[in-house]
């Protein structure tokens, strides 16, 4: 039986209610140099980060588990799995974004992978956070699009994003994740973030292609509760120092 007390979500919901801004650093285990984890985590601790997300398209849980153990030696930030596949479930994380790719029409990412993962998650002590995951067109084909074999919601189709997010909320998802894709050419537009955030009563996460302080603030100013930064930090571990000093 999973006896988790859901403290991570409670904290996100409180931040949402109080209009506080959260920031997750996304680490891709495929790209982490194990010997450099201490340095990387120290940089995250100095950043305004409130969460660490961990996930990638290729990795398997034994590698992730080892990486998580090492990360946890150096930080107390909550560590959430952001998996692309059930094989990436590592039981030593604090929680998991239990994603449903609602923008797509591939049953594997709507229910099949979730079904495969459910028995393990029920037995685990991971905090499971049901998350409606919406892939938004961002200028070029992204890894999520390739791996999931789904089409993103068109950038200017705000009505589609709003209706999908609302359906996600009504289905019981506790977070809406607007995803442009890792390394996206264009981040999700302000108009779309604002329209979605105004149309649901759960926190909105925004990620993909955000590489500047302005981009981060823009997402918050239009209604994001949590912004995810992956590539910008991956490319430059001084990224947060720079934006703090801007
Ligand atoms: C990807 O939203 C995240 O899933 C982060 O994207 O790597 O472009 O920051 P970036």
Image: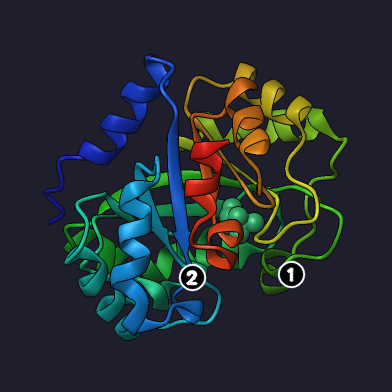
Above or below: residue 208 compared with residue 5: below
Depth order, front residue of 36/102? 36
Disc 2 designates what residue?
28
> How far from the left and from the top, in percent, is residue 62?
30, 85
**Helix, strand or loop at mark 1:** loop
Above or below: residue 174 compared with residue 104: above
Among the 4 quarters of the image, the one containing residue 159? top right
At a point 33% along the width and 68% down the height, the residue shown is 39
Q: Looking at the rendering, in which quadrant would you find the N terminus?
A: bottom left
Disc 1 designates what residue?
149
At a point 26% along the width and 80% down the height, the residue shown is 66
Horizontal relation, residue 3 to residue 165: left or right: left
At a point 44% along the width and 76% down the height, the residue shown is 29
> How far from the left and from the top, in percent, is residue 181?
68, 57
Residue 44 in view of the camera: yes
Above or below: residue 145 compared with residue 67: above
Using the numbered discs, state the Cα–Cα distance from disc 2 to disc 1 in whole angstroms: 21 Å
């Amino acid at each position: 039986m999973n006896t988790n007390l859901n403290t991570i979500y409670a904290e996100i919901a409180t931040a949402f209610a109080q209009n506080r801004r959260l920031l997750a650093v996304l680490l891709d285990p495929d790209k982490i140099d194990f010997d450099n984890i201490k340095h990387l985590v120290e940089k995250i601790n100095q950043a305004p980060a409130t969460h660490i997300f961990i996930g990638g398209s290729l990795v398997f849980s034994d590698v992730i588990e080892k990486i998580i153990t090492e990360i946890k030696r150096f930080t107390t930030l909550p560590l959430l799995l952001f998996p692309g596949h059930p094989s990436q479930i590592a039981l030593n994380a604090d929680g998991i974004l239990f994603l449903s790719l609602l923008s797509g029409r591939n049953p594997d990412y709507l229910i099949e992978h979730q079904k495969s993962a459910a028995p393990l998650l029920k037995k685990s002590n991971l905090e499971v956070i049901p998350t409606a995951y919406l892939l938004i067109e961002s200028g070029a084909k992204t890894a999520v699009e390739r791996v999931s074999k789904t089409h993103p919601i068109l950038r200017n189709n705000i009505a589609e994003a709003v209706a999908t997010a609302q359906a996600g909320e009504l289905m019981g998802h506790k977070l809406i994740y607007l995803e442009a894709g890792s390394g996206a050419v264009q981040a999700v537009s302000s108009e779309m973030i604002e329209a979605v955030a105004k149309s649901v009563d759960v926190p909105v996460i925004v990620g993909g292609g955000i590489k500047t302080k302005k981009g981060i603030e823009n997402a918050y100013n239009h209604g994001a509760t949590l912004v995810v930064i992956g590539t910008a930090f991956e490319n430059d571990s001084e990224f947060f120092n720079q934006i703090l000093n801007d």
